[in-house]
Image: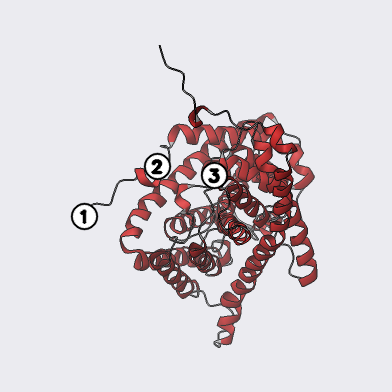
Amino acid sequence: MPVARTGPETASPPDPLTLLRSREYLVLLVLAALIGVPVSAAAFGFLALVGEVQPLIYTDLPKALGFDGTPPWWPLPLLAVGGLLTGLTIQYLPGRGGHEPTAGFETAGPPTPVELPGIFFAALATLCFAAVLGPESPLLTLGAGLAAGVVRMVRRDPPELVTGVLGAAGSFAAVSFLLGSPLLGAFLLMEASGLGGPMMALVLMPGLLAAGIGALMFVGLGSWTGLGTYSLALHDVPEAMSPTAAEFGWALVIGLSAALVGLGIRRLAVRLKTHVERRRVVATVGMGLVVAGLAIGYAEGTGRAATDVLYSGQTALDPLLAHSTTYSVGALSLLVLCKGLAYCASLSSFRGGPIFPAMFVGAAGGILLSHLPGLSLVAGFTMGVGAMSAAMLRLPLVSVLLATLLIGSEGLTVMPLVIVAVVVSYVATAKLAPPLMEPEEQPAPRRQ
């Protein structure tokens, strides 16, 4: 007969309602609100810096060097320099540049202060020099690190729970408006961190408060500086038609196709990563040249801008949908292929977030399929975004919200289709893909 144990091991967890009514929790909310101001301002500054540097080195620098516009070969030195800077940062600075993107979208504890410069510079080199990754993962990590640093400045040895909760609040504030809504950022962190149970509301409340304040900061700073909010948004969305039986069939096709494409991208990226890690700096430069070559090949083959393939795709989603009728079937096919391979190469070596490239590849694929009978443009676009996000992020709720909230009021019309496509993609990915290994479970590289 088992012996009943007493002591700390069997101590009952704190009652959530009691914690909610406590003075300490009110203090935690105040701290979260205060932390949201500097962290969101820092996140806005980071996005503004990236937004200013990207056209500076892609458009203005070639003109300053005497070229008539940006030459077709310009992505080659651009990505080579970006790969060199990213590789050196990962190799030599503490923290290895932050979150490793082939592992998918995940959250972890706040980084230490000594790791923040490496995370910042790796993300800056990745985003400014046109690798195909987004800013969301670096912002989450930097926001958590800054918030935890502020807590440690106020109190020398803060409780681990306080540091973790306020670090999460910093992450909320950093991405509060990046995805178009503070609520969507909250769902992203909730689903990615696996929060659940009665403690969920207590942990989420400081984060939601920080996110709301962060969103106000983004709007205020965007208006004051004239730089905008750097928020994901579409402005010219065609009218969505009511779902048809044929489109529900297309939802199955798009969901399964996205799972297969996402699985291919992830597996190839993981395989490439093992080679990159053996010679980090040289291999990262090489992957940068691969991305550049894909962008140049797409531009030469279609006559369209190389920037369709370069960068995360966050700002390219709006013109892609608005000018979708100007893309031929061949151009869209080449865009999906080149963007997907560039995404894969960037995942294997650079540092950044996986969300926006996945959305863009899915959107382009959905627009391509809308040229076939029985699938409307808006339905194909949104189902592609949702299904590809589910395949790459493995966050089904967030994937549905990303696709439907992105197109505003039209999202309610196509939401049933998006749900079907996301569920099919998520289940198929879970069935086909092996579980992601934790770092300590990964096999060591063979000795030559």
> Mark 1 belongs to which amino acid?
Arg
Q: Position of residue 300 (x, y in %)?
A: 51, 67
Q: Looking at this view, name the residue that lies furthest to the left.
A: 448
Q: Which residue is mark 2?
A: 437
Would residue 68 be found to the left or right of residue 318 on screen?
left
> Mark 3 belongs to which amino acid?
Leu
- Can you tell which quarter of the image residue 128 is in? bottom right
> Mark 2 belongs to which amino acid?
Met
Q: Quadrant of the C terminus?
A: bottom left
Q: Looking at this view, name the residue that lies furthest to the bottom.
A: 66
Badge 1 vs badge 3, beta-carbon distance below 8 Å: no
Would residue 312 be found to the left or right of residue 268 on screen?
right
- Can you tell which quarter of the image residue 191 is in? top right
Report the residue at 49% width, 44% height from top: 262
Q: How is the image coloured?
A: secondary structure
Q: Which residue is mark 1?
A: 447
Q: Which residue is mark 3?
A: 393
Which callout, 3 or 2, points to the residue nearer the camera?
A: 2
Q: Looking at this view, name the residue that lies furthest to the front.
A: 7
Q: Position of residue 114 (x, y in %)?
A: 48, 64
Q: Can residue 355 be seen in the rendering of this structure?
A: yes
The CA span between labels 3 and 2 is: 15 Å
For numbered disc 2, what is the local secondary structure? loop
First in residue order: circle 2 vs circle 1: 2
Which of the two residues, 180 or 219, is positioned nearer the viewer here? 219
| Mark 3 Cα shell of 10 Å, populated few (<14), some (14-19), many (≥20) | many
For numbered disc 3, what is the local secondary structure? helix
Would residue 253 be found to the left or right of residue 32 on screen?
left
Q: Is residue 359 above or below residue 7?
A: below
